[in-house]
Image (cartoon, rainbow, N blue to C red):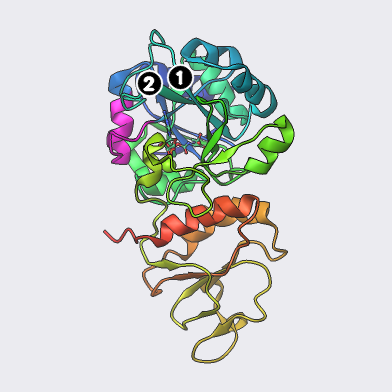
Amino acid sequence: MAIVAVTDQSLQQAADIIKKGGLVAIPTETVYGLGCNALDTVAVQSVFTAKGRPAINPLIVHVSAIADAHKIAHLSPLAQEIATHFWPGPLTMVLLRRENSGISDLCTAGLDTIAIRFPEHDVARKIIQMAGVPVAAPSANASGSISPTSPRHVHDSLGDKVDMILAGGACKAGLESTVVDVTTDVPVILRYGVVTKEIIQGTLGVDVLDGVANDQNADIKSSIKSPGQLLKHYAPTIPLRMNAIDVDADEALLAFGGTKFMGIKTGGAVSAFPEDQIKNLSESADLEEAAKNLFSYMRDLDNEKFKGIAVMNVPNEGVGMAINDRLFRASKGSNKP
Ligand code: TXA
Ligand code: MG
């Protein structure tokens, strides 16, 4: 599928494709999404098929106005406050769905809750507005593989399974949205993202619990709440290992910060590595910059000629928690065909 430049005409075409039940890869500030009409079960089914996604894993529904979220879900006063502060932006709320919302049950995997996001990216907002329907959009990659942060990534992962890929450049945040369950009195984080627990607590002055499945930092166990988080994720083709303190001569290195003290096991310094064997997430150890580069650099290093990818330690604070979460899941199994 050709990658199409953003023009008034291509935006209209994208909106028309969605209205008619097709699939469009849409740039957002987090990652590229595979968008379809959330009201159309056949369209939603084709998203699951294109990704090879298990039907137990619900999709996020995207809107282009807070008022539209009210039409499909119940927002508590706290949820409304979160919407006011963080929408549009890289945050998804899990809410109780309205029975008459019209959203396909397939989209919500039969749950009585629904995940909703109002993205900030101009192109995403315009397409949702022009389509005039809520847009279901998982990340535009094959299920389990590395999420796409450029139109080229979408093309490489899904090819002709998409009716249109819109070129919106590289994604600003580079990691999927923070998922927060707001169906209870105290919000619970189900997936880490660039909007951290501390940011939400600091902005709203309320307690927020960490309920990220399988994470040692979690305050509570809420694995049933976010089915997708239990599945294999973000996996490159070759193995990936975290917190590397040195590297094999035939391993690729995903660095973070200074590499002066990173040695090659058989001797020598990594500065001798050819360009395609080493990528630095952020030379200045900036976590936001690292988040933006993470998926793209993982893809760059995912080359069969290396035995694996060694990743240097990334501090587990702020956005670093979201980065480590993705790396941890990636380390749990390579996606070798
Ligand atoms: O940044 C993002 O959120 C991107 C862009 C395209 O918006 N989308 C994205 O979608 O990451 P996806 O499908 O890759 O991840 C959706 C996550 C999954 O972990 C899923 O389990 C969770 O949201 N989710 C969806 N509906 C849910 C619900 N009702 N309750 C709990 N978790 C839910
Ligand atoms: Mg995904």
* Residue 323 quadrant: bottom right
Residue stretch in magenta: 44-58
Q: Position of residue 282 (x, y in %)?
A: 66, 62
Q: Residue 286 appears in which quarter of the rendering? A: bottom right
Mark-to-mark CA distance, 1 and 2: 6 Å
Residue on which disc 2 sits? 112
Give the image quadrant in which the ligand numbered 2 is located.
top left
Q: Position of residue 241 (x, y in %)?
A: 45, 68
Name which of mark 1 and mark 2 comes first in the sequence: 1
For label 1, the SS is: strand
* Above/below status of 72 relative to 110: above
What residue did someone put label 1 on? 96
Q: Are marks 1 and 2 in contact (CB under 8 Å)?
A: yes
Residue nearest the viewer, comparing 100 with 26 = 100
Q: Nearer the viewer, residue 302 or 10?
A: 302
Q: Give the vertical position of 201 relative to 277 (above or below).
A: above
The C terminus - image quarter: bottom left
Q: Residue at x 28, y 27 (%)?
A: 45
Relative to residue 330, is residue 86 drawn left or right? right
Q: Quadrant of residue 138?
A: top left
Residue drawn at the location 60% of the way across and 63% of the way down: 314
Question: Percent x, y for residue 120?
Answer: 63, 30
Query: Pointer 2: residues within 10 angstroms few (<14), some, or many (20+)?
Result: few
Q: Quadrant of the N terminus?
A: top left
Residue displayed at 67% across by 51% down = 288
Q: Amino acid at mark 2?
A: Asp
Give the residue type that dot 1 points to: Leu
Find numbered disc 2 in the image and state the secondary structure of the residue it sits on.
loop
Which numbered dot is residue 334? Answer: none
